[in-house]
Amino acid sequence: MTRVFIEASGGMTSGYIIQNLKRAGATVIASDISKDNHSLALSDEFILMPSSSTDGIRLILENAIKKHNVDLVIPSLDETLLDWAHIADSTNLNVSISPIETISTFCDKWKAFKFFKDNEINTPDTSINPKYPFFKPRRGRGGSGIFTNENIQKLPEDYICQEYIKGQEYTVDCLFDDNGVLIYCIPRKRIKVASGKSVIGMTINHSGIIKEIVKFSKLIVFKGMINFQCIENERGVFFIEVNPRLAGGMALGIAATENWFNLVIENIVNKKSIKPKVEPIFPLTMYRYFHEVFA
């Protein structure tokens, strides 16, 4: 059985990741900074990890993978993505992750904005000066640290300000193979969001968004599971950010197609080419709820 390592498995959306990995026949090695979470009961093995801000975390990650005979790493934590990209680049460990350039670009919202503008991709105007009253951390996730203020004269350190765009929010779940070929592209409406996470969503066959993702994939290399976030209004589709990693809401993209974890294992561990096997289901609605685990 393929031994797969996942991180931040104490998160509320990790259950579907563990379940789909098990359906793919994998042994799931979960990890988190706390043992007090559901993944301890759901996974096959559990590793207690230090904080991602710990000095020498890259070596700690690499040593944990070797010690536990891991066949595949599927990262999901923004704070360690660059470490995993360097590990993938400098060792023979199997990591489902995009190249260092891609991770470096999209884990920094200011670099992402410059990429969008340089490649004529529609995106909200963004500045490192207090041009707009809508502020975001340059590096962050799940809406953490976002605030509005009309009276700021100087941006906080490592913040951007951004034009505020109203409209219909979309997340686009994508799977790329290890050569950067787009396998699946599933746009979904974010119908209801709680604490930065989609709790009600619906797949939409949005040809305009899919066309833009195809354009993206020819400009920079993506590998593995990626999600794109955009907003559509009467002015068009605005790309807000790219999360170059597995994300919680991808449960819907997977349910609308097939088990992507099967494909990733086949591609990266077994070194086989992959292609889509089913037509996506449009529309398909996802509703999220709490589920109890007893151990």
Image (tube, rainbow, N blue to C red):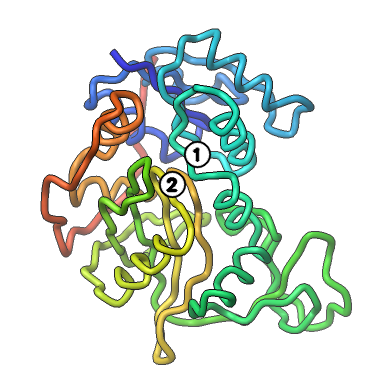
- Above or below, comparing residue 90 to residue 226 in the picture: above
Residue at 31% x, 60% y is: 201
> What amino acid is found at the position of numbered circle 1 in the picture?
Ser
| Residue under pointer 2 | 247
Give left or right: position of 106 versus 153: left
- Above or below, comparing residue 210 to residue 48 in the picture: below
Residue 107: percent from left, percent from top: 61, 53
Residue at 67% x, 19% y is: 60
Neighbourhood count class around disc 1 (C-alpha, 10 Å): few under 14, some 14–19, many 20 upward = many
Q: Quadrant of residue 248?
A: top left
Q: Nearer the viewer, residue 132 or 186?
A: 186
Q: Quadrant of the N terminus?
A: top left
Residue at 39% x, 77% y is: 168
- First-in-chain label (1 vs 2): 1
Residue 238: percent from left, percent from top: 47, 78
Q: Quadrant of residue 29?
A: top left
Cα separation, mark 1 vs mark 2, equals 7 Å
Residue 157: percent from left, percent from top: 84, 61
Give left or right: position of 24 versus 234: left
> What amino acid is found at the position of numbered circle 2 in the picture?
Ala
Residue at 37% x, 16% y is: 3
Marker disc for residue 76: 1
Give left or right: position of 79 versus 248: right
Q: Secondary structure at mark 1?
A: loop
Marker disc for residue 53: none
